[in-house]
């Protein structure tokens, strides 16, 4: 059976362990056109991994952040005439996710011309107690599981979480659908033991751009805390009902 190939742009910065799991999953479902878009990683094991990778590696001398696939020109280079995928390196499809998921994403885009991208919902039911922001993550992410849309998908914004995009540019985050189970993924940082970070986790936080990371900090960014407070307010709870 021939597997349809899609350009897969993975935005990379010092977080190696989940990247390896993600690449292994992509290889396992037959994807070969994988692009590791590295934003000036300095973690030595990451450098070693990129140097040995059989996939396309694009290295940048500065950290272009979460918009790097667009700012670097990779989206323009790879995605003007074909469906393509952009993802963070730490979003890994669940083991029970059917292997036809990428073709389903493509078919959903083709059937819904008003939608710019289709991606994974992020699993919340198995987040561990030892992750210090567990309750805040569940509160925040639950809003993306509420609005059921076409073909059993949820109408929910997607930024750079794993998603397939229709060919072209100027895609909008709010023109997006997230898949329902069993087509789900895990955001791997939400599973780490906050009291006992690994060497890699410590390195990532110490060398990350403080304006970019959200859930890895001990104290969440002020803007995120403000949004969470709004979600907790009685007026918001009533409006959701």
Image (cartoon, rainbow, N blue to C red):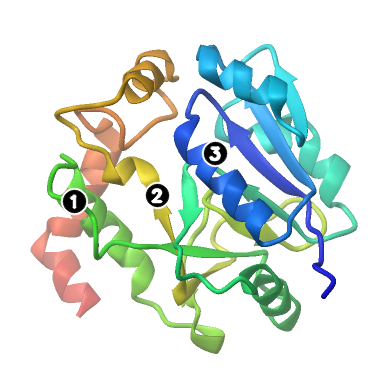
Earlier sequence position, callout 2 versus callout 1? 1
- Name the residue carrying label 1: 128
Q: Which residue is pictured at 34% across the width and 35% down the height?
A: 214
Question: Which disc is residue 155 wearing?
Answer: none
Q: Distance between the residues labelled 2 and 1?
A: 12 Å
Coordinates of residue 12 in the picture (x, y in percent) = 58, 31
Earlier sequence position, callout 2 versus callout 3? 3
Coordinates of residue 190 in the picture (x, y in percent) = 30, 45
Q: What element carries label 2?
A: strand
Coordinates of residue 100 in the picture (x, y in percent) = 65, 74
Q: What element carries label 1?
A: loop
Q: What element carries label 3?
A: helix
Tell me if residue 105 comes above or below residue 124 in the rendering: below
Q: Which residue is pictured at 71% across the width and 30% down the height?
A: 53
46 with respect to 121 (left or right): right
Residue 189 in view (yes/no): yes
- Name the residue carrying label 3: 20
Q: Which of 48 and 142 is in front in this view?
A: 48
- Name the residue carrying label 2: 187
Tell me if residue 115 comes above or below residue 48 in the rendering: below
User: Outermost residue toward the left?
Assistant: 234
Q: Which residue is pictured at 18% across the width and 51% down the height?
A: 128
Q: Nearer the viewer, residue 95 or 37?
A: 95
Q: Residues within 10 Å of mark 2 (few under 14, many from 20)?
A: many
Q: Which of 41 and 136 is in front in this view?
A: 41
Residue 172 in view (yes/no): no
């Amino acid at each position: 059976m021939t597997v349809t190939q899609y350009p897969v742009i993975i935005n990379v910065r010092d977080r190696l362990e989940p990247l390896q799991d993600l690449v292994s999953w992509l290889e396992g479902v037959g994807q070969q056109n994988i692009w590791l878009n590295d934003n000036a990683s300095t973690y030595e094991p990451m450098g070693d991994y990129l140097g040995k990778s059989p996939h396309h590696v694009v290295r940048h001398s500065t950290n272009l952040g979460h918009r790097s696939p667009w700012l670097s020109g990779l989206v323009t280079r790879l995605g003007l005439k074909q469906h393509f995928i952009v993802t963070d390196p730490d979003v890994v499809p669940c083991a029970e996710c059917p292997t036809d998921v990428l073709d389903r994403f493509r078919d959903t885009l083709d059937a819904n011309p008003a939608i710019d991208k289709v991606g994974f919902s992020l699993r919340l039911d198995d987040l561990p107690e030892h992750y210090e922001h567990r309750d805040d993550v569940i509160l925040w992410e639950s809003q993306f599981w509420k609005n059921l849309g076409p073909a059993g998908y949820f109408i929910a914004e997607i930024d750079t979480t794993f998603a397939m995009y229709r060919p072209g540019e100027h895609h909008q985050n709010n023109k997006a659908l997230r898949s329902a189970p069993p087509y789900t993924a895990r955001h791997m940082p939400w599973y780490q033991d906050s009291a006992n970070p690994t060497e890699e986790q410590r390195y990532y936080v110490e060398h990350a751009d403080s304006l970019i990371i959200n859930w890895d900090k001990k104290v969440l960014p002020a803007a995120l805390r403000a949004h969470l407070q709004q979600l907790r307010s009685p007026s918001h709870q009533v409006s959701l009902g």
